[in-house]
């Protein structure tokens, strides 16, 4: 792989409307990005969030350290016009950075059919997820039946990319969902969030090969797993074991922490990517600050986190290198893998 990367969140909206990263401490950000470069041996980082300023600040730090930045705005739950305007504003900011630091790729949003209003049926994110991942919907996708949301999405992307090219003059890609059928001719690289779950475990290598047939460099913009027994079977839905409606959010059942599940999953998929000469891969994710660890398994939200470090923020203490988190097994395994490949 040319780019060995990881996702880094500077603050996005959750399904309950809160921010994933309430405090944006630039000193902490700089230390975390240095660790991503020096200890995880990444040469690329995908920086996402709703704040363009935060993305730009973190991107400049990463670029100065020699990392290739994938500048990835994530504007969830807005209408198409607002989303378009926000993406174009982001592209203009990204171009200012790119003229100084050329190693910058612009990502035209993330799974826009799901996170933008009007493409998929449903008023809430949960309703849209149920529609996308329903057995009927997945069966239609397997049969290759054309979906209305894909037609509308490609029309939106074509318009958006035309406008982006007026203000941004570097390489452009998009982070697509596995249910989205994107016309990649308008992009420099193809990007897909490609998780493995129980339903596609046997067909995952074949699925990866099918994406490789796209006549563009293939980038896996997201892949990851949570750290509990059975999380590898849930794949992209591993996070959905938290009941956020409770006064104190808790897991919705009995789960057993298992960090080896997470690390094994990541290494297996990375080996698939190497075998298929995938151009770039970005582990999801470095840390999820809002999924905090707790000694009581019922309240250990970190089990539902894709982060390769566990957030200890609620304790008020400092841990690894005076940061509010502790590395998981996947942190060390990923660092070894990237160092040796």
Image (tube, rainbow, N blue to C red):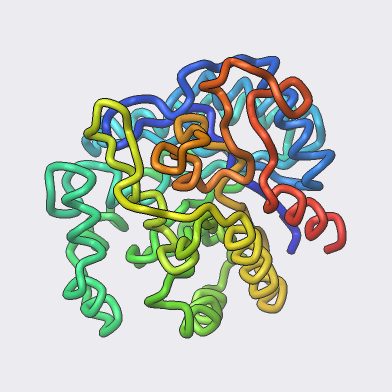
Q: Residue at x 57, y 56 (%)?
A: 258
Q: Is residue 188 visible?
A: no
Q: Nearer the viewer, residue 190 or 10?
A: 10
Q: Residue at x 49, y 62 (%)?
A: 229
| In this picture, residue 68 sits left or right of residue 137 | right
Q: Residue 299: horizontal and vertical position, in percent?
A: 41, 37
Q: Residue 126: horizontal and vertical position, in percent?
A: 21, 48
Q: Nearer the viewer, residue 61 or 332?
A: 332
Quadrant of the image containing the N terminus: bottom right
Q: Is residue 247 visible?
A: yes
| Total marks placed | 0
Q: Residue 163: horizontal and vertical position, in percent?
A: 40, 39
Q: Residue at x 41, y 74 (%)?
A: 198
Q: Residue 164: horizontal and vertical position, in percent?
A: 45, 39
Quadrant of the image containing the C terminus: bottom right
Q: Nearer the viewer, residue 245 or 253?
A: 253
Q: Residue at x 61, y 54 (%)?
A: 259
| In this picture, residue 291 sits left or right of residue 155 | right
Picture layout, residue 213 above or below residue 98: below
């Amino acid at each position: 792989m040319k780019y060995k990367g990881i996702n880094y969140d500077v603050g996005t909206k959750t399904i309950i409307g809160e921010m994933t990263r309430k405090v944006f401490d630039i000193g902490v950000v700089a230390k975390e990005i240095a660790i991503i470069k020096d200890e995880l041996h990444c040469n690329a980082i995908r920086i996402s969030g709703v704040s363009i300023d935060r993305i730009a600040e973190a991107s400049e730090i990463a670029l100065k350290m020699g990392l290739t930045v994938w500048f990835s705005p994530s504007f969830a739950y807005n209408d198409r016009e607002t989303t378009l305007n926000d993406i174009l504003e982001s592209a203009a900011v990204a171009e200012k950075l790119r003229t100084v630091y050329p190693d910058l790729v612009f990502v035209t949003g993330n799974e826009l059919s799901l996170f933008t209003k009007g493409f998929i049926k449903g008023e809430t994110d949960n309703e849209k997820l149920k529609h996308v991942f329903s057995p009927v919907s997945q069966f239609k996708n397997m049969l290759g039946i054309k979906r209305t949301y894909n037609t509308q999405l490609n029309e939106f992307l074509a318009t958006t990319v035309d406008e982006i090219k007026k203000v941004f003059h570097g390489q452009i890609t998009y982070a697509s969902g596995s249910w989205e059928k994107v016309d990649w001719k308008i992009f420099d690289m193809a990007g897909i969030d490609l998780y493995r779950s129980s339903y596609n475990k046997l067909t995952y290598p074949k699925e990866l090969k099918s994406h490789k047939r796209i006549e563009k460099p293939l980038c896996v913009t997201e892949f990851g797993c949570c750290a509990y027994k059975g999380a590898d079977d849930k794949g992209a839905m591993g996070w959905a074991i938290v009941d956020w409606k409770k006064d104190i959010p808790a897991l919705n059942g009995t789960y057993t922490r298992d960090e080896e599940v997470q690390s094994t999953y990541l290494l297996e998929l990375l080996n698939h990517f190497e075998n298929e000469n995938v151009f770039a891969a970005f582990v999801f994710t470095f840390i999820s600050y809002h999924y905090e660890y707790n000694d009581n398994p019922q309240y250990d939200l970190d089990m539902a986190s894709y982060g390769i470090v566990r957030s200890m923020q609620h304790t008020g203490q400092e841990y690894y290198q005076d940061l509010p988190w502790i590395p998981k097994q996947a942190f060390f395994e990923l660092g070894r893998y990237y160092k040796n490949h």
